[in-house]
Amino acid sequence: MSVHEAYIPRAESVTTADLITNFLRNPGGGRIVVEGDQGVGKTTFVNFHRQCWEKAAKHKLLSPALELEMQSNWDERGLLINLLASLSSRIRLEMNNKSFVKEELLHEITALVGVNIEDTGGFNATLSILGTGAGVGRTQGKAVIVGEVTNDLLRQYFRRLVSFVLRRGYSGVIFHLDNLDKLGVREPENLKTFFESVRDILQEPGVYFIFVGNTGLFQKVIVPLPRVRSIFFDTPIHLEPLSLTEVKMVMDRRYHLLVAPGKKWIVPVTTEVVENLYTIFEGKIRYIMNSITSLISHLPDSYAQPLTIIQAMSLLQGIAISEMKRVLKGAEQEVFLLAAKLNCFTNSELGTHSRKSKQLIQKYLKNWLSLNLVSRAEKTGRNQFYKVEPRFAVLRER
């Protein structure tokens, strides 16, 4: 499905669209943060504008096919390897195998990052050494002998690869780095260290870096680092949840795009269900759509009418309770139901409501975190807040 077909512009899109357009219009590259709560549509927003600049803009910017999912253990080396792998893979989509292999630079990067190359003559080589030890990569009769791959060598390859893209007629490259939501909440200090270590890489001419993360990421992670702050676009783009009207428009658009041609179809849930889910999930469209998908997957094939609000909420709560009971036992289930009702809480608050000791609540929380039933939210002073994962929010109305 084309993001252009499925995308519904936001009511505040005049402001947000102008910001990202001005950022990408600035020649020479740049760095910007797009922030907002989980599930409000940040990734879709960035993907839409990435596609606009690759397909429709006069000065086209190349983007890897997918966003890069940042990991907590990334450093300069980890970032460079992933940038090289994603960009070289994207370039290969535009070139036939013969042309790709003839390019010495692409051949060498293939050996470094482990991109698979197949020869119609029967030779197939996959090599991934990631800079340790030594190795030999062979592609289409060529050989690359690699010793210790230093960060400096990786930086050189990155510059050369970007230059290769520019010579192919593009005005630059966009890298969309996702998954900073959880890292920004759980590991802000690690993120600060990461940005300090990769500052020079982020200034590569012709490259636009878009970092997508949680609300407050720019203020908490970027602003306290003067050297890093100085190279970022002045204003982060903050996305609020879509309005109820916009959510309905998005869903209606996708219903029509996905319908089998010439077939009769019905909506899966009534308007009241959508409105109720909108309230429960505070307008976060990802969780609204995930809930409807979950409902559909639990319906028998013979069911052919929209679910009412009573039917939908009963089924969603049953699904959530079944998941909880699979992993929690006895008194812990009741405490978790209290946590779901509170939604956001501290150890002390949950202990007061459940009349359990702080030590027992801490034991439960450790287990829930490992099972992804709750996540750490903001920390105020010494108080660490926790939040029940959105899929269990339906239990608040139980």
Image (tube, rainbow, N blue to C red):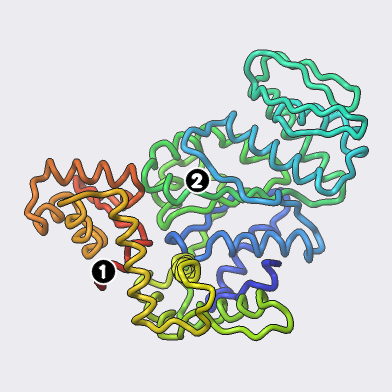
Q: Position of residue 328 (x, y in %)?
A: 26, 49
Name the outermost residue toward the front.
302
Q: In this view of the protein, which residue sits in the foreground, 27 or 5?
A: 5
Please state if 121 lies on the left or on the right of 214 as rendered.
right
Q: The residue under label 2 is which amino acid type?
A: Arg
Mark with earlier residue (2, 1): 2
Label 2, secondary structure: give it.
Answer: helix
Q: Which image quadrant is residue 120 in?
A: top right
Front label number (2 vs 1): 1
| Rendered-image quadrant of the C terminus | bottom left
Label 1, secondary structure: give it.
Answer: helix
Residue shown at 65% from the left, 80% from the top: 256
Indicate which disc residue 396 carries: 1
Q: In this view of the protein, which residue sits in the foreground, 227 or 141?
A: 141
Q: In this view of the protein, which residue sits in the foreground, 280 or 57?
A: 280
Q: The residue under label 1 is which amino acid type?
A: Arg
Crowd band around label 2 with a 10 angstrom C-alpha radius: few (<14), some (14–19), many (20+): some
Q: Position of residue 360 (x, y in %)?
A: 13, 43
Say if 357 sits above or below 314 in the image: above
Crowd band around label 1 with a 10 angstrom C-alpha radius: few (<14), some (14–19), many (20+): some
Give the residue number, with chain letter if any, for mark 2: 229
Residue shown at 37% from the left, 48% from the top: 185
From mark 2 to mark 1, how far is it between C-alphas?
Answer: 41 Å
Say if 115 sits above or below 283 in the image: above
Q: Position of residue 168 (x, y in %)?
A: 87, 47
Q: In this view of the protein, which residue sits in the foreground, 162 or 326?
A: 326
Q: Position of residue 5 (x, y in %)?
A: 69, 73
Indicate which disc residue 266 carries: none
Please state if 240 lies on the left or on the right of 102 as rendered.
left
Residue shown at 65% from the left, 51% from the top: 66
| Rendered-image quadrant of the N terminus | bottom right
Say if 288 sits above or below 367 in the image: below
